[in-house]
Image (tube, rainbow, N blue to C red):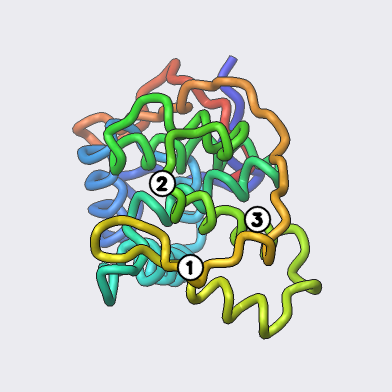
């Protein structure tokens, strides 16, 4: 039996404001499924718009320099920190996006379970080391640690800057997560939800 997406009412697609409905259908076309968070937030259209405007500003903004984070690297951070926080919903949803950006079917699972065993560049490993420290030990981060992290960047040829100090960041092992296929809820052409689709990502 399919469990509800949210404790709150989930509006029918055809009853959503036009901009919300268009966004939901665009996501389905690009990714092949609609994350439940879109359907849950649609209960409050103003919050939906604010949440996804912030998401787009953070996750979809192009890098401001060659050393900036790519879309795939941002998704790596979300997947790794979601793993340590044991948020299965975000591991699955952002893992699906990570697979699309990096064109790697295994990378998302590796990053969620133990990113240090994943096929990452040294820069990406250092990036996740720092992200995990921010996630689990933010009160212990000092100005010196931030400066050292800022110097951790790739040269144009893809090597770590010589001033990078890995000792500034203590590795954190994320909790393991089982392999789970992305829960999917498809929207039919008439705007209604298809019946019988998987709905394992509840409460978001």
Lower sequence index among marks 1 and 2:
2
Residue pictured at 72% horizontal, 48% vertical: 172
Q: Which of 83 and 203 is in front in this view?
A: 83
In the foreground, 36 or 76: 76
Packing grade of label 1 (10 A; few <14, some 14-19, many >=20) is many
The label nearer to you, 3 versus 1, is 1
Image location of residue 100, percent across then percent down: 29, 37
Residue drawn at point x = 43 percent, y = 32 percent: 107
The total of numbered circles placed on residues is 3
Q: Where is residue 183 in the image (x, y as percent from the top left)?
A: 47, 27
* Crowd class of label 2 (few under 14; some 14 to 19; many from 20; radius 10 Å): few
> Which label sits on residue 132?
3
Q: In which quarter of the image is the N terminus?
A: top right
**Quarter location, residue 69:** bottom left
Which residue position holds label 2?
121
Real-space Cα separation, disc 2 to disc 3, in angstroms: 17 Å
**Gap between marks 3 and 1 measured at Cα:** 15 Å
Q: What element carries label 2?
A: loop
Q: Position of residue 173 (x, y in %)?
A: 71, 41
Instruction: Bin the neighbour count of mark 3 within 10 Å (Cα to Cα): few under 14, some 14-19, many 20 and up.
Output: many
Q: How far, Cα to Cα, is label 1 from label 2?
A: 12 Å
Query: Could you tell me which quadrant the C terminus lies in?
Result: top right
Tell me, yes or no, whether the two marked residues, 3 and 1, touch with CB atoms within 8 Å: no
- Which residue bears the numbered disc 1? 152
Q: Which residue is drawn at 56% across and 20% down?
A: 179
Q: Which residue lies furthest to the front in this view?
A: 162
Compare marks 3 and 1 and give the one earlier in the sequence. Answer: 3
């Amino acid at each position: 039996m399919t469990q509800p997406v949210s404790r709150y009412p989930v509006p029918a697609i055809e009853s959503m404001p036009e901009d919300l409905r268009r966004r939901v259908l665009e996501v389905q076309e690009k990714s092949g499924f609609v994350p439940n968070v879109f359907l849950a937030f649609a209960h409050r259209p103003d919050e939906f718009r604010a949440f996804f405007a912030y998401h787009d500003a953070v996750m979809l903004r192009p890098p401001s320099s060659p050393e900036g984070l790519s879309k795939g690297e941002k998704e790596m951070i979300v997947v790794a920190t979601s793993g340590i926080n044991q948020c299965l919903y975000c591991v699955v949803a952002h893992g699906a996006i990570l697979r699309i950006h990096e064109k790697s079917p295994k990378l998302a699972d590796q990053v969620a379970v133990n990113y240090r065993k994943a096929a990452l560049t040294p820069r990406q490993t250092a990036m996740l080391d720092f992200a995990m420290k921010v996630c689990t030990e933010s009160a212990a981060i000092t100005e010196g640690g931030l400066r050292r992290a800022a110097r951790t960047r790739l040269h144009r040829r893809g090597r770590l800057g010589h001033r990078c100090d890995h000792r500034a960041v203590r590795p954190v092992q994320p909790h393991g997560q089982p392999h789970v296929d992305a829960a999917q809820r498809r929207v039919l052409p008439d705007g209604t939800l298809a019946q019988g689709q998987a709905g394992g990502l509840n409460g978001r």
